[in-house]
Image: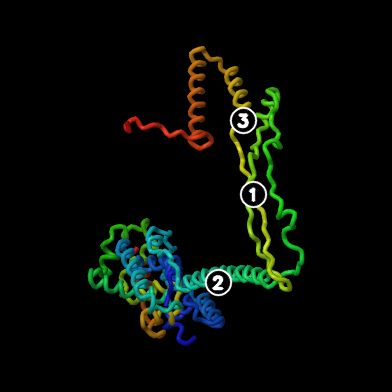
Amino acid sequence: MIDTKEYNNAVREYTRNLFRYVFKSLRDEEASNDIVQDCFLKLWNEKEKVNNLKIKYWLFATAHNTMINYLKKSSKMVSIDSVLYDEPHANSKSDFDVKEILEKSLDTLPTIQKTIILLRDLEGYNYQEIGEILSLSEAQVKVYLFRGRQKIKDLLKHLHAVL
Amino acid sequence: MKGLDNNMDEVFFDYYEGNLSENEKTELFSLLDDNPSLHHDFMLWKNAYVHEPLPPIGAMERSLIKHEKWSFTAKTYAALGIAACAGIMVLFWLITAERKLDQKSNVLNTPIKENNEPAVSDFSQSTNKVILKKNITRPTNKNQLPSVKENFQPRVSSIDTVTARLDMVKEKNSDIVSDVSIDTFNIDTEPLQLEENVIENMTQQAMPLSKKELKKIQKAKERAKIRRQEQEFLKGDQPYVVPIDPNRF
């Protein structure tokens, strides 16, 4: 159970992290705001059920599930072709930006791999914590993480070869 | 590190994830030194990590904050505090009330001292004190009057004596009933006749009046004098003459 003070502390501590995580996944500011607000609304409504020591996990797990539902509803899946070959400035070497390519490569990954990479890189969660959030084992998390990073590395390597 | 050549991606991944021991790291770096072609993949793995700063604090964060209400514990503490204050006040009131009761009981329980002498002396019981008018300092001539007016003091016109009965209880002797005289002073604040004349003269001096006004005042005085005589007559100081009823005859 959490009280108002703990809830407010969670808002101050995790709102920006949660928004960054959701925005990185969706690339939609409005939808990200909605999901973050929805998460905190659910937290407030279920404050008597939530363990105060696991607020952050609960928030990220809720955000992940809400995000999945949002993607299912909007069918907002990005194909690798649209990312790598349809963008006009990807052909120009002067516009080449590792960060931008990385973000677009992230969008090509399956949601689970992308989510794990974001939780690992942005929030610094270990495999166990990611497993708790996404209801996966540590080994599964590690495998998904490795596959996701390998795909990104391959895409970066491919782009380097093309450019 | 087994099969380095075949699983270089796994090794690089483990290195960047921090899963390699110090020996494995040393082995990896010696391998990279020996094979410069692996450097490119090594750097690509480094670039596969996402770095993103936190966004600034927005309006959303402020809107999500809930205003804290009094928690149950805070309410409990407040109620306890109020109850404690009320208790202290009640205790203080009880202590003061008890002290007052003690004082009263002390007075009631104090034994009355025996005294054979009467509370009021015989002389004072039998004497009726009457201050006559002649004893009161009065102005004898006009020159004294202004100073009397300035230092005006109420005059005691008469003193009435009331005799009361005082019952005194004595343990040994029989009851003694004594008469006690109590003097009541009547205060006369009206100016005396001589003073009235002086006040009139002073008002005349202050405000000079015409002859007509003086005549009016004189007439008013005469009327007042007649009225006073009538009142004294009605009081019974003078013999009352029954008026003849003209309708009788």
Nearest the viewer among B20 and B214 is B214
Kindly tell me whether residue A66 is visible in this rendering. Answer: yes
Residue bearing the label numbered 1: B161
Q: Is residue A33 left or right of residue B152?
A: left
Could you tell me the amino acid type at mark 2? Gly
Q: Residue B204: horizontal and vertical position, in percent?
A: 58, 18
Using residue B117 as the reference point, say whether residue A52 is left or right of it.
left
The numbered mark, 2 or 3, whose residue comes first in the sequence reads: 2
The answer to which quarter of the image holds residue A137 is: bottom left
Horizontal side of residue A14 vs B194, given as left or right: left
Q: Residue furthest right?
A: B116
Relative height, residue B114 to residue B137 (above, below): below
Colour option used: rainbow
Tell which subunit mark 3 falls on. Answer: B
Which amino acid lies under the numbered mark 3 shown in the image of this protein? Leu
Q: Nearer the viewer, mark 2 or mark 3?
A: 3
The kind of residue tagged 1 is: Thr
Q: Are marks 2 and 3 on the same chain?
A: yes
Give x and y (percent) for residue B18: 50, 78
Give the Cα distance between marks 2 and 3.
66 Å
| Quadrant assignment for the C terminus of chain B | top left
